[in-house]
Image (cartoon, rainbow, N blue to C red):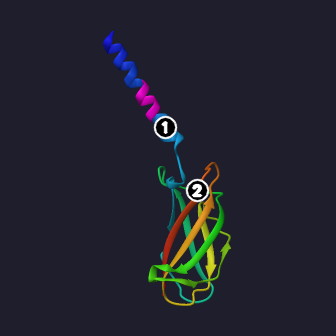
Amino acid sequence: MRYLHSARAAFAVLSITTLSSSAFASAADYEFQPVKADVKNGGGSQLAVRLVHKPTGKPVEGALLIRTRLDMSPDSMDEMTAKHTATPTAEPGVYAFTADFTMAGGWALKLQAKVPGEADTVEGTVVFKAQ
């Protein structure tokens, strides 16, 4: 009888743990990655990021980018920003931009996005090297 009680308790703990891991999915389960880290310095440069669901490795389509900022914070020049605009792309989970880099060096694209089915805002920073 004691064995049966222990087995039930173990099953209950296992069930709760399994349900908890899927119930507590969060914005931390997503990551922005550079499609290509090296970009052309100057006006009209193309850059792109891929949004990935880390547990599955699959690209995330349909995210709504609510805020983006492109600055030189990797080179300790946070106040140096670059104009950029979103451009269409046909590749699933890829979000592309055209940027006007004013200086060669490290640039950080900081993003905030709403992902379908995710309550929290997904945030990330992708570093590019303008050459």
Residue found 55% across the figure and 84% down from its top: 79
Q: Which residues are magenta?
A: 12-17
Q: Is residue 36 visible?
A: no
Residue found 67% across the figure and 73% down from its top: 87
Quadrant of the rendered structure where residue 14 is?
top left
SS under mark 2: loop
Q: Position of residue 33 (x, y in %)?
A: 50, 66
Q: Is residue 76 left or right of residue 7?
A: right
- For residue 20, which numbered disc appears in the image? 1
| Magenta span includes 14 | yes
| Magenta span includes 120 | no
Residue type pointed to by label 2: Val
Q: Is residue 19 left or right of residue 84?
A: left
Q: Position of residue 34 (x, y in %)?
A: 50, 70
Residue that badge 2 annotates:
60
Q: CA distance from mark 1 to mark 2?
A: 23 Å
Marked residue nearer the N-terminal end (1 or 2) = 1
Q: Which quarter shows the N terminus? A: top left
